[in-house]
Image (cartoon, rainbow, N blue to C red):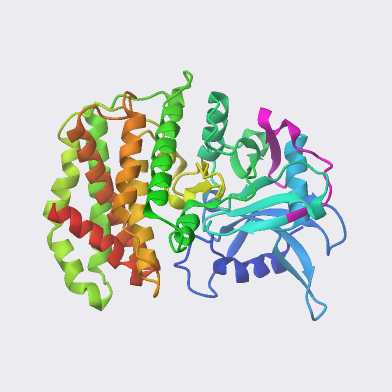
Amino acid sequence: MADTDTIAAISRWLPATRWFADKNIAEGACRLELFEEVLLTEGTDATDLRLLLVKLAGQSHRGCYVVPVQRRSEADGSLSDGDAATSPDFASWLLTLISWEAERPGRNGRLVGRRTAAGAALGADDPPLKILPLGGDASNTSLLVAAADNGEGGPPVLIKLIRRYRTGIQPEVEVGAFLARGGFDGSPPLLGWVEYQPAGGAGESGVVATVHAGLVGTESLWDYLCTRSQQVNCQLEELVSVAADLGRLTASMHAALAGQDHHAAFQPQQPTTADTERLAEAMVEHADSVFTELADGCPAALKQRVKAVLDARPTIIAHLQQIGHQPLAASFIRVHGDYHLGQVLIDPTTKKLWVIDFEGEPSRSLAERRAKTSALKDVTGVCRSFDYLARHLGRQPGNRPLEAGPLTAAFLQAYKTTAAGHCFWPTDPSEARRLLDAFTLDKALYELAYELHHRPDWLEVPLAAVERLLAN
């Protein structure tokens, strides 16, 4: 059973993790409370594997963190409780629970394994596992899991431990199951998941981990383009071709999300006047919050440019409000919601692409992530990602320059061609332009706030994007 020493140990290392969201807590001031404890494997005090849901003192369970722990021997002979997310024991336990669709009781509820039809081949008695943690996933922990020593186990799988526990329908599971039913082959199949259920129907359940088919030999499209663009035998035409492929894949993803059946959560929605007004209001509220943050301070070297943006507040607000002034003909649909080059995998040999991570923006509520909106939200995410890619490469001394323009143009043209005739793509080019401009401005404002707090030296990148939009 987790004791005060365990909670104290977790309190010391939890704030330093990439996925800890409450970064405003002063160092050494993190106080945790135990919400749930599930014993996963029984053994001695030194080998017990447990999954804990811990929350900041005084907060509700909606702010829980998912922390598997295992006691480890330190060099001085003492024992300490460390994060067990990358432990083969934890991966084996999780895959077995899903394979058998089994349950494991805890203090206040239970963990339940769920398996899809695609996950029927998950083996409960596979040989020892090797674990490859995957980087670039700040809000969760992702692991590529395969049989150790070239064993005879099944194909590799990708485990994602969802570190921030939230009750309700998890988009990663909902979208994965929906796309699998429709036969969409542009994303690794969802094999199963683990959810936590409160005892006695005391509340909604929530997903703590998902398992997808693992894709060996792939890398993120961001990493691929960073590396390939700097190789001497790389021609711009090759990168433009990949960008066009991404445009076609993105439009195909939206076509799949627009509904292969009559599932209400995925049925396209014709936006009403109230819907468009709410969209504009949300963008304006977001802009106001960013203006407030920028006014509180920014790097001295950019102060004059930031002041010019703040002075242009009426123009920016009017630009965002125009979305609500005219009816929108294109349907609102379910979208990826956090779409950028890091959310796409590529096989460097075949150039095949796959979309991953349908969880949505982790900082938003599940209801917000599941809301239908314009497909241009995702399109904008990729366009902004191309701009970041070019700026990133340009900041490294000795790099070959890469212009974002040709990649963005190829992506947009291929997307438009593939999306033409679908309900989510505007037939009126002016409507498409209004949406693209508004979502681009909204995204750039989001980036301004993010960079201000996390990477002030990158603030110039979204600042330049806002300045370009104001100049048009």
What residue is drawn where x is 66% and y is 51%? 144
Is 123 one of the magenta-colored residues?
yes
Residue 360 in sight? yes
Instruction: Please identify the quarter of the rendering in which residue 470 is found.
Output: bottom left
The quadrant of the rendering that contains the N terminus is: bottom right
Residue 235: x and y in percent read 40, 55
Residue 374: x and y in percent read 32, 35
Residue 317: x and y in percent read 16, 50
118 or 309, which lies in front? 118
Q: Which residue is outermost to the front?
A: 233
Q: As displayed, is residue 217 above or below residue 112? A: below
What residue is drawn where x is 42% and y is 50%? 238
What residue is drawn where x is 13% and y is 58%? 312
Q: What stretch is highlighted in magenta?
A: 105-130
Q: As displayed, is residue 164 above or below residue 323? A: below
Is 356 one of the magenta-colored residues?
no
Direction from residue 250 to residue 79 in the image, left or right = right
414 or 427, which lies in front? 414
Direction from residue 283 to residue 61 in the image, left or right = right
22 or 310, which lies in front? 310
Residue 105 in sight? no
Direction from residue 374 to residue 234 in the image, left or right = right
